[in-house]
Amino acid sequence: MRLRTRLSLFSPVSTVLAALLFGLVPQPFQGAEQAKPNVIVIVSDDQGSVDARCYGAQDLLTPGIDRLAAQGLRFTQFYSAAPVCSPSRAGLLTGRYPWLAGMPSNAADPPSEGDDQLDTLTGQGLPATEVTLAKMFHAAGYATAHIGKWHLGSGLGHKPLDQGFDYSFGFMGGCIDNYTHFFYWGGANRHDLWENNQRVRLPGHYFPDLMVEKAEAFIAAHPTQPFFMYFAINMPHYPYQGDEKWLRHYRTLPYPRNLYAAFVSTLDERVDRLVKYLEGAGLRKETIIIYQSDNGHSVEERAHFGGGSSGPYRGAKFSVFEGGIRLPAIISWPGHLPEGQVRGQVAHSCDWMPTLAELCRVPLPKVRLNGCSLGGVLRSPDAQSPHDVLEWRQGDQWAVRQGPWKLLHNPDDRADAKKLAQADREWFLANVNDDPGERTNVASMHPDIVGKLRSLATRNPEEPAAK
């Protein structure tokens, strides 16, 4: 167990300490040097908007995720940076809208079988000039690890080890078979399992278990150094390969919900296993854990055309409707942040970088961020959201939200049986407080609001919006 001074926001000197902890500029504490907290960012893959018991899915068993929520704060208006994998991850890791971070769409496919090292490859990916969470924490003296899915490029400058990570284990593409570790898409099958830029072959080993084992080993290897871990688990993304016990448990659910549910509970067990390891090592109260989904559930053929749920929200993966971007998100730091509470303020995955910089007292990178610190929101359910305007772009879709109003252009609604009329594809306006399902287009009733939101969405996003 590490010998660390423990700080609580609810201690007798909470006012002074909170001011330091959540100040706009990270400041050192007076007196004895306090060890910085560890950070683990867990990203699930294609998890639907309501697909955890704590988010209302009564047909799912997710005690691990639910326990994180009970030990922390659960958001109900949390948005990913994009409705698809690579841009969403780029936004989370850089604190910048993905199209500004050089990642407007998915990264290139993984390398071919003949390339056993990643050091000389080229291809589309996250630019080396971007500053990631890993670079920020590495500069602050943290050990940094990427474990799991990458999908931000395997070419020169794009790999995890190029982006601030000291250690990397996982796959470079969008998905793999969990037992053979092959990427199946177009053309020849490609083996896609790597450790520190070297191909490793571990056939028959279940990838989610490998992830937990590598995470535990990394933590054990750094007994005195604070660590940042990006734990990008590849579930419940297809192929649906849940544990046999969960497939039996959900056998009475309709297809394909049964397959998806089994994979969600399989995911949940691995998350809980990692948290319990921290508890056993005496590190739980010294570790901030963030949990979020990258985008909404998939309705692709490879996902059996569904299985996940967006609950009351319209849309799914690939869509800028709420079901593609409004997702589960939790932050937990027992003894330091409120526990068992819900936050309804609008928040965004780009917010994690400035939020973590404040919580951990590390300097923010000197770049223009789209994320805002959630420090005030974490402290108080009555605090205002730090966001006035949020934007999303996905292919020829875009959306902008200001207050309760959200305007969409050319939205994708492939998950919805009721297809959009042509007029709705051009401009779709909804008040998401009154109509969270975005079922009624009120654009014709509020031309002034449409005009205002159009002007916000078409401005240079690097320029601040007028309030």
Image (spheres, rainbow, N blue to C red):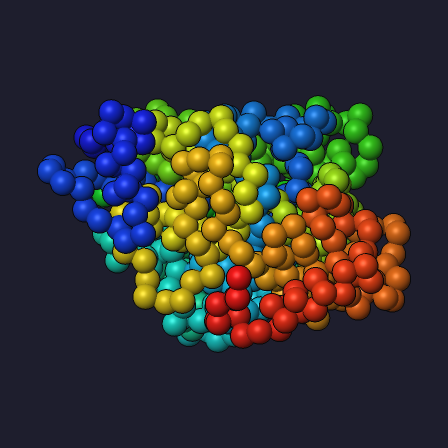
Q: Quadrant of residue 47?
A: top right
Determine whether 108 is above or below 199 in the image: below
In the rendered structure, the answer to whether residue 446 lies left or right of residue 367 reads: right
In the rendered structure, the answer to whether residue 196 lies left or right of residue 300 reads: left
Determine whether 12 is above or below 381 in the image: above
Q: Residue at x 67, y 30 (%)?
A: 56
Q: Nearer the viewer, residue 404 or 351?
A: 404
Q: Position of residue 242 (x, y in %)?
A: 65, 36
Q: Residue at x 38, y 38 (%)?
A: 288
Q: Residue at x 87, y 56 (%)?
A: 419
Residue positioned most to the left: 31
Residue 259 appears in the rendering? yes
Determine whether 14 is above or below 145 in the image: above
Q: Position of residue 3 (x, y in %)?
A: 19, 30
Q: Position of residue 283 (x, y in %)?
A: 31, 31
Residue 318 appears in the rendering? no
Q: Nearer the viewer, residue 176 or 234?
A: 234
Q: Position of residue 96 (x, y in %)?
A: 47, 63
Name the quadrant of the N terminus. Answer: top left
Q: Quadrant of residue 278?
A: top left
Q: Residue at x 57, y 39 (%)?
A: 344
> How many labels were placed on the picture?
0
